[in-house]
């Protein structure tokens, strides 16, 4: 496989090639997608990131935007290619890596959500991905606004936020009306329905908080939403073995690596943004329950859980150490009322602007960047020794 992989790369970068036709660009983009998947399977995240960046650059340079509206997918080869790269782009954005390339070509503020129902779970997912991308774009605009004029939030940004919230509400109505159809088709349809519910909740929280990127205390008003995400995740975790058996049979061993988006990003988001100790710890335990080999595209459950646990430890600083908290609970047990009676974590403890740089290979290091008490901090995790080390010099951020 590696020999053919090397030959394929050599063919794509031959010197003295004539100007690329549209058909050769399509071949290059499809090959780029295959390269990304190969590198993700090998856990060479740096190489996968490079291939994704190259694919995004090629799309932008050649203005192959396809039809962003999901109902057009399937009618054009270009649309299918763009959709595949766009899906990986959304995955990458959710991890918030420092080397992330912005790609404004995917911003589509005027999309109309289908009503009264979605035609398929795939269509529902595509529209939700487009809304997530709008949220990414608005968040970047808000951060730029804070840098240029911290005291002001423009009416344009507020109006954009209002439109996204309205479209998220429309998406939720169509998704809810589609439940019977999705669940009736197959057990997988019901599983996808619940997974999309988690993403919608996460997108809603992101929208409500995006105009105040430095105000981590805002997430305290979304505790009920974080708990709902945890309860849905518990349901998915309990039913995952049955789904796997239904799809693959009891004796078939399948790789736990998938190229699509699953539950890792919402659980990671909960662990990093929710300051209720029990809820964020349960999100981490759910991530850890999938084992060391579960991977969803660029997201690795073991790495996500490791980073989230480190963020929790650095943020809480043993604040709850003398309160006799019982952390020895099952990952699939529901939170209890007393779990919400702990004192709130002081605002000065909060960590913000969490960013992660993934290792170049299985033996590399995960680098965690964040801000705490107006200080820029950086830690790195050695994949071999399984140890965290604080980095004193973060000029390479």
Image (cartoon, rainbow, N blue to C red):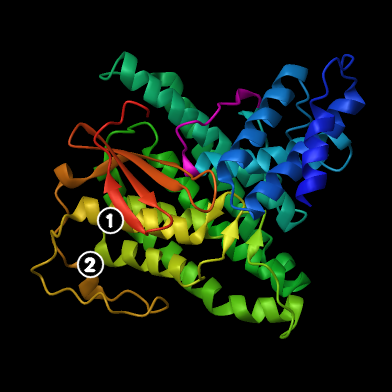
Relative side of 74 to 221, left or right = right
Residue at 14% across, 60% down: 318
Q: Is residue 104 magenta?
A: yes
Which mark is drawn over residue 86?
A: none
Residue closest to the eye, 199 or 80: 80
SS class, disc 1: helix
Residue at 74% in and 66% down: 181
Residue 71, percent across and down?
79, 42
> Badge 1, how many Cα within 10 Å: few under 14, some, many 20+?
many
x%, y% of residue 391?
27, 39
Residue 340 image label: 2
Q: Residue at x 49, y 31 (%)?
A: 99
Distance between the alpha carbons at the discs numbered 2 and 1: 17 Å
Q: Is residue 141 above or below residue 69?
A: above
- Over which residues does the magenta segment extend? 95-105
Which mark is in front, 2 or 1? 1
Label 1 belongs to which residue? 312
Residue 351: image location, x then y, percent: 26, 43
Position of residue 101 in the picture relative to residue 302 (left or right): right
Please name whichever residue, 138 or 304, is drawn nearer the observer in this view of the structure: 304
Pointer 2 or 1: first along the chain = 1
Evaluate whether residue 115 shows in this view. no
Pick the residue in front: 289 or 165.
289
In the image, residue 181 lies in the stretch drawn in magenta: no
Based on the displayed image, in which of its 4 quarters is residue 112 positioned?
Answer: top right
- Tell me if I can see residue 93 in this picture: yes
Relative height, residue 108 to residue 225 (above, below) = above
């Amino acid at each position: 496989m590696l020999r053919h992989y090397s030959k394929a790369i050599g063919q794509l970068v031959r010197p003295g090639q004539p100007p690329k036709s549209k058909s050769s660009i399509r071949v290059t983009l499809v090959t780029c997608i295959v390269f990304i998947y190969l590198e993700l399977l090998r856990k060479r995240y740096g190489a996968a990131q490079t291939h994704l960046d190259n694919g995004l650059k090629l799309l932008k340079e050649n203005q192959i935007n396809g039809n962003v509206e999901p109902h057009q997918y399937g009618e054009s080869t270009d649309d299918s290619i763009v959709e595949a790269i766009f899906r990986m782009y959304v995955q990458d954005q959710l991890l918030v890596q420092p080397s992330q390339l912005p790609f404004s070509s995917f911003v589509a503020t005027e999309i109309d959500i289908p009503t009264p129902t979605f035609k398929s779970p795939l269509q529902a997912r595509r529209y939700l991905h487009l809304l997530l991308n709008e949220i990414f774009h608005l968040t970047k605009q808000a951060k730029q606004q804070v840098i240029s004029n911290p005291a002001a939030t423009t009416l344009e940004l507020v109006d954009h936020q209002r439109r996204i919230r309205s479209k998220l509400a429309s998406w939720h109505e169509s998704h809810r009306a589609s439940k019977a159809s999705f669940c009736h088709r197959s057990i997988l349809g019901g599983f996808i329905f619940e997974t999309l519910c988690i993403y919608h909740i996460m997108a809603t929280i992101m929208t409500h908080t995006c105009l105040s990127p430095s105000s981590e205390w805002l997430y305290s008003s979304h505790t009920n939403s974080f708990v709902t995400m945890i309860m849905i995740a518990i349901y998915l975790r309990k039913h995952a073995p049955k789904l796997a058996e239904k799809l693959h049979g009891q004796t078939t061993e399948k790789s736990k690596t998938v190229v699509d988006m699953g539950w890792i990003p919402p659980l990671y988001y909960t662990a990093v943004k929710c300051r209720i100790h029990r809820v964020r710890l349960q999100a981490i335990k759910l991530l850890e329950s999938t084992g060391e080999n579960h991977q969803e595209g660029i997201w690795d459950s073991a790495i996500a859980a490791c980073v989230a646990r480190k963020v929790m430890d650095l943020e809480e600083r043993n604040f709850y150490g003398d309160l006799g908290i019982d952390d020895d609970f099952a990952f699939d047990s529901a939170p209890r009322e007393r779990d919400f009676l702990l004192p709130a974590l002081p605002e000065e403890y909060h960590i913000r602007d969490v960013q992660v740089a993934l290792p170049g290979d299985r033996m590399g290091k995960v680098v965690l960047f964040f801000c705490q008490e107006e200080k820029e901090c950086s830690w790195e995790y050695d994949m071999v020794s399984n140890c965290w080390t604080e980095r004193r010099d973060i000029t390479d951020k």
